Structures are given as structure tokens and as C-alpha cells.
Image: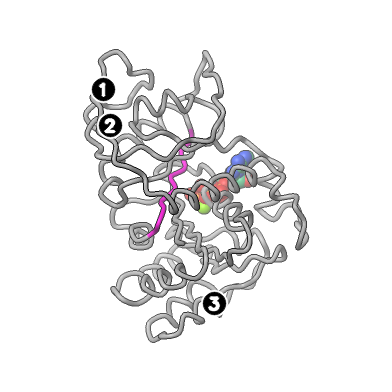
């Protein structure tokens, strides 16, 4: 299974959540994390990994590779036991490597897809947009998870991007991050029901950023709030793959429902997206004063 994780604005925690998803994916699946963020990787620096092997060496090897093993050979295993193909922190090098991996049809993208038929591959695409060298991986993923903060500015930006995203994948999975608008409000305005909400979890984020050591076999990550959400998302994606989601007829927006300021009607009513699967979140009551 190939799962791409991305944002459209800001830094809502894509790298932290990608790592959580890979680390907390239910056994017995074999999981692999690939950093495909053209602005540069974070996991290598955060986790104190060697600069090679990684995305750069994989991109070079993938040109002539026939054997799927090549992808695993360019991963380094984190202390918690997770193999990671890390991107260099230098954005120029990361973008060049990612372009080389994904630009020629039938090379790197095909290899990653093939690996995903025997393992769970989580791809951190960073901030995604048309022309991004990470886009070919997101387009061929079984699921594209979009992270967005639940504030008006972030949601307005997301609403503008949804029509394009709908052309990449028919059913993106939306996860809200931190406090802000409720999932019900977001679903009403964007026509995409958020699958859940990643809470602010500084302790979990510290584990996933290497600021706190996680020992192999420790369940501390799964017990963290962000790890718990990652596990629920993994379980939902597995169930969704087993049961095809029926098509849902697009509804027209009723006037007066615009609770998210700045979200344009035209963009959201014509996004062509199907709702996400049944959300697992518990409603968090919306608050009076909202940040934007
Ligand atoms: N759920 C969370 N709770 C609290 N802090 C978080 C959470 N997720 C991420 N953070 C913190 O936010 C910062 C950015 O996280 P991260 O690197 O995952 O964002 P990103 O979306 O990948 O950003 P970029 O687009 O720059 O790669 C980190 O310092 C991390 O510790
Ligand atoms: Mg990141």
C-alpha cells in the first residue's frame, strides 16, 4: 500500500505525522518511510542519520534498477526499527534527487509502486503543488492524506486547491491539525469530511523529532496522542481498501452556511471530490474566538 502525506500551506506537521504513521502501522505489515519533500528532508538531521544512503543514492540507483531490493538498500533503519529513505536537508539536492527519481516514467515511481505491493510505503511529499517533483508519487498513491491547520487562512487556501487536488486523486483524506474550526464546519464548507484531527502533542512530536529517544519495542509512540491518531488512520485506510466507497452525489451549498470566512463558494462547490470515509474523530466544540 502506498500512502502519500502532504500539506498545501504552512508546516502543519507532515513529517512528524508521516513518521508516526509508518512507525505505528499495525503489524505484521513491513513499513518503509520515504522522504520526498522537495524543500529538503528533516528526518535525517532530527534522528542523527548518516547522509548516505538515502534519496540521493536511491535516485541514482533507480535509473538502472530491476530489483525491488534496491529501494530497501537505500534505507537506513532508525533506532525504533523503522527503515527510512531520507532526503538531504539541502532543498536543492533533495529537489534534484526527487526529480531524477520521478521524472522518467517507468523508473523510480514504478519501483516505489512495486515495493508498495509487498509493503506499506509512507511518502512524505511535503508541501505539494502542481509541478512538484513529489507529485507523481502522490498521484499513484493508494491514499493521499492532506494535513491542514483548522484556521480560516489555512482552510481558505485548501479550498482553492481542492479542485486541482481532485484531479490528482478522487478521494483525498483530510486531517485537521490542532484547534480551530470543527470537523463538521470544515466538512460543510469544503465538501470533504475530515477523517480526524491530530491534536497538539508536543511530547509526541518530541519523540518523532528525535528530541526524546524511543527504544526498539517501546510502545511509547503508540501511546502518544499523535501516534494514536496515526494508528486509527492506518486502520481506517486498511478498512477502506477492503470495502470500496460508494459514489456520493454532490450536494449544492445552501446559502448562509459559510461559517469559514474566506472560503470561496465556487471553488468548494465544484471540487468534484467524494467525501472521505467515515470519520473517527470526536467532535470538538468550536470556540468563540478563532485564530485566522
Ligand atoms: N501534533 C503536533 N503537536 C505539536 N507539535 C507538532 C505536532 N506536529 C508537528 N509538531 C512540531 O511542528 C514542527 C513542524 O513539524 P513538521 O516538521 O512535521 O512539519 P512539516 O509540515 O513537515 O513542515 P515542512 O513543510 O517545513 O516540512 C516541529 O517542530 C514539530 O515538533
Ligand atoms: Mg516536513
Q: Secondary structure at mark 2?
A: helix
Q: Nearer the viewer, residue 269 or 151?
A: 269
Q: Does the stretch in magenta take in 144?
A: yes
Q: Nearer the viewer, residue 236 or 55?
A: 236
**Which-is-in-front pick, marks 3 and 1?**
1
Q: Residues within 10 Å of mark 1 (few under 14, many from 20)?
A: some
Give the residue number, with chain letter if any, for mark 2: 268
Q: Does the stretch in magenta take in 134?
A: no
Span shown in magenta: 141-149
Q: How far across and how far down the image is residue 193, in percent?
A: 41, 33
At x 44%, y 83%, the residue is: 61
Residue 210 to residue 160: above or below? below
Give the residue number, with chain letter if any, for mark 3: 74
Mark positioned earlier in the residue sequence (1 or 2): 1
Q: How far across and how far down the image is residue 266, in percent?
A: 21, 29
Q: How far across and how far down the image is residue 149, in percent?
A: 48, 35
Q: CA distance from mark 3 to mark 1?
A: 48 Å
Amino acid at each position: 500500500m502506498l500512502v502519500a502525506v502532504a500539506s498545501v500551506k504552512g508546516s502543519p506537521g507532515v513529517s512528524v505525522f508521516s513518521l508516526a504513521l509508518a512507525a505505528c502501522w499495525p503489524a505484521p505489515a513491513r513499513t518503509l518511510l520515504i522522504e520526498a519533500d522537495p524543500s529538503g528532508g528533516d528526518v535525517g538531521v532530527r534522528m542523527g542519520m548518516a547522509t548516505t544512503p538515502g534519496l540521493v543514492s536511491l535516485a541514482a540507483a533507480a535509473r538502472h534498477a530491476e530489483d525491488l531490493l534496491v529501494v530497501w538498500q537505500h534505507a537506513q533503519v532508525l533506532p525504533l526499527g523503522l527503515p527510512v529513505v531520507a532526503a538531504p536537508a539541502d532543498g536543492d539536492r533533495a529537489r534534484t534527487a526527487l526529480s531524477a527519481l520521478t521524472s522518467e516514467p517507468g523508473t523510480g515511481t514504478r519501483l516505489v509502486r512495486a515495493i508498495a505491493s509487498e509493503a506499506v510505503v509512507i511518502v512524505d511529499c511535503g508541501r505539494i503543488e502542481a509541478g512538484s517533483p513529489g507529485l507523481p508519487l502522490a498521484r499513484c498513491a493508494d491514499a493521499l492524506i492532506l494535513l491542514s491547520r483548522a484556521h480560516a487562512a489555512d482552510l481558505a487556501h485548501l479550498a482553492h486547491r481542492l479542485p486541482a487536488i481532485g484531479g490528482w486523486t478522487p478521494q483525498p483524506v483530510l486531517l485537521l491539525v490542532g484547534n480551530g474550526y470543527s470537523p463538521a464546519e470544515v466538512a460543510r464548507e469544503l465538501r470533504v469530511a475530515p477523517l480526524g484531527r491530530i491534536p497538539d502533542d508536543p511530547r509526541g512530536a518530541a519523540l518523532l523529532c528525535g528530541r526524546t529517544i524511543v527504544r526498539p519495542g517501546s510502545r511509547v509512540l503508540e501511546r502518544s496522542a499523535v501516534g494514536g491518531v496515526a494508528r486509527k488512520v492506518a486502520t481506517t485506510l486498511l478498512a477502506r481498501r477492503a470495502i470500496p466507497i460508494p459514489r456520493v452525489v454532490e450536494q449544492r451549498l445552501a446559502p448562509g452556511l459559510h461559517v469559514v470566512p474566506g472560503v470561496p463558494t465556487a471553488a468548494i462547490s465544484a471540487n468534484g471530490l467524494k467525501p472521505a470515509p467515515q470519520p473517527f474523530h470526536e467532535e470538538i466544540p468550536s470556540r468563540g474566538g478563532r485564530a485566522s
